[in-house]
Structure formats: C-alpha cells, structure tokens
Image (tube, rainbow, N blue to C red):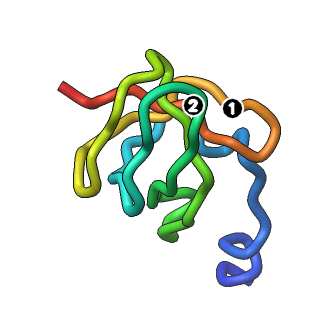
Amino acid sequence: MRNEENVNWSASDAMFQPGEVYLKIPEGKGSGLVNVKINGAMREMKAKSKDSMVIETGSPVVVVDVDGEYAIVSRQQ
C-alpha cells in the first residue's frame, strides 16, 4: 500500500520543499527543471525563478509557489 501512496501526488505537494535545479532556469520568464522530494520520492518538475533571475544547474532551491504545472522556486540560502 505504501508504494501506491508515493505514486499519487500533485504539484501543490511540492510547496516549501527543497530541491535542486536539474536544467538551468534562464533569466526572465523562461523555465527549467528541478528535482524535488515529494512524498518520499524524487520528482522532476518544470520550474520558473521567483525573481526572474538565472538559477544554474545544481543550485539548491526551495519551492515557494506553484503556478499550474510550474514550481516557482527561489535559491536556497
């Protein structure tokens, strides 16, 4: 039963979770990819930068909002 729980998730489950940029998030309104741990499993999500600044591959981030299918992320300090 536990494995079934890990399969079912929604983008809102990513809120306030830490992650790592997998594909660079470009400046402006462009998007990249992040890996975020959701319900005990790593999930890949499309992501945009909260402050519209570049976030390089490998940078630690935190999900601060969700806009449709996109995680809105900020650099983790």
Where does residue 8 sit, x and y in percent of width and height? 79, 67
Amino acid type of the residue tagged 1 in the rendering: Val
Residue pictured at 37% horizontal, 24% vertical = 53
Residue sitting at x 44%, y 16%: 51
Task: Compare marks 1 and 2 and give the one earlier in the sequence.
Answer: 1
When the figure is inspected, residue 72 is found, relative to residue 39, above or below; the finding is: above
Q: Which residue is mark 2?
A: 72
- Residue 34 horizontal side relative to residue 65, left or right: left
The vertical placement of 77 against 62, above or below, is: above
Figure quadrant of the N terminus: bottom right
Mark 1 neighbour density, 10 Å: few (under 14) some (14–19) many (20 or more) = some
73 or 32: nearer the viewer: 32
* Residue 20 marker: none
> SS of the residue at dot 2?
strand
List x then y, in percent, for residue 24.
Answer: 37, 52
Quadrant where the image shows the C terminus: top left
Which residue has dot 1 on it?
66
Q: What crowding class fits label 2: few (fewer than 14 Cα within 10 Å), some (14-19), or many (20 or more)?
A: many
Outermost residue to the left: 77
Vertical order, 15 against 22 (above or below): above
**Residue 74 placement: quadrant:** top left
Q: How many marks?
A: 2
Decide which of 44, 53 is in the foreground and name it. Answer: 53
Instruction: Name the residue at 50% across, 65% down.
Output: 40
Left/right placement of residue 77 relative to residue 37 reads left
Q: Is residue 48 left or right of residue 9?
A: left
Task: Mark 1 and mark 2 in contact? Answer it, CB < 8 Å.
Answer: yes
Whole-percent x, y for residue 7 in the image: 73, 75
In the image as oriented, which residue stretches furthest toward the top?
Answer: 51
Q: Please report the residue visible at 26 percent of the width from the left and 30 percent of the height from the top.
A: 76
User: Which amino acid lies under the numbered mark 2 shown in the image of this protein?
Assistant: Ile
Determine the secondary structure under disc 1. strand
